[in-house]
Amino acid sequence: MTTIEPRPAVAAPLRFPAGFRWGTATAAYQIEGAARADGRTPSIWDTFSRTPGKVLNGDTGDTAADHYHRMREDVALLKELGVGDYRFSVAWPRVQPTGRGPANQRGLDFYRRLVDELLDAGIRPVVTLYHWDLPQELETGSDGDSAVGGGWPHRDTAERFADYTGYVAAALGDRVATWTTLNEPWCAAFLGYAAGVHAPGRTEPAAALRAAHHLNLAHGRATQALRAVLPASAEISLTLNLHALRPASRSEADREAVRRLDAVGNRIFLDPVFHGRLPADLVRDTAALTDWSFVLDGDLETIATAVDSLGINYYAPTVVAAGTRTAPPPSPSPWPGAAAHAEFRPPAGPRTAMGWPVDADGLYELLTRLRGELPHVPLLVTENGAAYHDYADPEGHVHDPERIAYLHGHLGAVARAIADGAAVRGYFLWSLLDNFEWAYGYSKRFGIVHVDFASQRRTLKDSARWYAGVVARNGLA
């Protein structure tokens, strides 16, 4: 791997290219609530959040930000911000409650109303088909026996995802021009099936590798399903949380640790999707766990079905040193084949409320890496943002200067990458609303709109008004 030296920060003011897409992003389970409304059935996150000890304070997404009932209010906020795009996800168990069989029209109706509301507000809808809310019945089967369903480690789940995709595309394809198949399949596979810190909470490294392949296959099958229904002008994408990996030193051992993590963190998705191949070093690294015999003839060709863009989610870089090869891997770990060979070093500098370092250079490094590796693939920054300890003051204002500084620095990194030839076409801030932050429950606030979860009152934070200014002038002041 080549280490890219970041350039000095671009001096403000600066402008982004004409037609640059400005948006915000959310996910269904994190904001919608209405967990039992209009035929919706449990997802793996409903089950996981109800499992004692899995989510902080026992929080669930049952109500979340109540977006299901406050959708028009939230679209009005988007219009007030002036953004041109809104990236949201569709809840699979709302549309196809068991993950099989016919579509639930009451569930699809909600998304029809949302798309119509966005279009009436002059906002382009950007649909993500999967943001981790697998129907519970596909994980455990109708009788609760995991051997019947099996979730993403089982091949059939990819086929069911293609069917579901067809229903959503048929309902919304005449009005939605931009589609994302999967959001962060690395998290779905390795946090859900290896580390067990996300739903469904399993700690099975070999199953996690199967899940990663079947998520890739689901992406390919869904892309084909979309192509069969949508007009040729539709944009089809995939969103990855690629890891900005840095060796702790120039030593060969530290670089080898980075290589292993890059194989199971980045290239496990990039290589099949864009090159139609499995990384040979990944296969070697994980030989003690699996022989990869679940990769069948034709799979890689399906996975490599052409897409129109790639979404990148970025929050912080990862500094890596060589681990002790004789020590057992940390258990459970989201890094099968690499955990025993790597140690993570905390970078110096400021941190967000998540404990993540604030380092915009990592975003620059990822975008310029992709400029070299995928020169003909347009890029979108589909998530970027920060959690801080926000609160409303006695006057009802929410001041968040740290978030503004974070966003300013990361938008500067995007601008530098564009200036250096990266084909970045847009930026989607995470997130529009404070929400259910997965295993952290309601303890972490990523929104530029403050949500009082007791009253569901929305309040624009200072960062929301700042971002509206960025959007209006298409640049940083």
Image: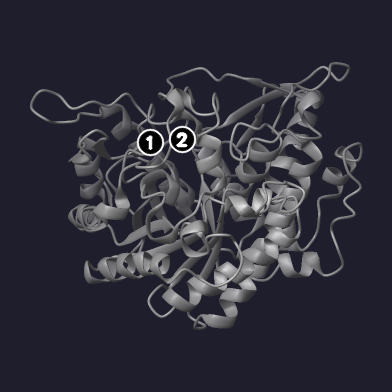
Is label 1 in a helix, a strand or a loop? helix
Residue type at the position of mark 2: Ala
- Residue 17 showing in the rendered view: yes
Q: Nearer the viewer, residue 25 or 15?
A: 25
User: Where residue 35 sits in the image (x, y, percent)?
Assistant: 41, 49
Left or right: where does residue 321 sit relative to residue 407? right
Q: Amino acid at mark 1?
A: Gly
The residue most toward the left is 395
Q: Is residue 199 left or right of residue 40?
A: right
The numbered mark at residue 409 is 1
In this view, the residue in front, 56 or 19, is 56
Query: Is 83 located above or below residue 318 in the figure?
Result: below
Residue at 30 percent across and 51 percent down: it is 67
Residue 99, by quadrant, is bottom right
User: Which residue shows up at 36% across the image and 44% down it?
Assistant: 431
Q: Is residue 364 visible?
A: no
Outermost residue toward the front? 143
Between 426 and 118, the one nearer to me in the picture: 118
Tell me if mark 1 has few (under 14), some (14-19) or many (20+) residues whose alpha carbon lies within 10 angstroms of its own: some
Q: Closer to the N terminus: mark 1 or mark 2?
A: 2
Residue 360 image label = 2
Q: Position of residue 96 (x, y in %)?
A: 53, 64
- Residue 455 location in percent, x, y? 20, 36
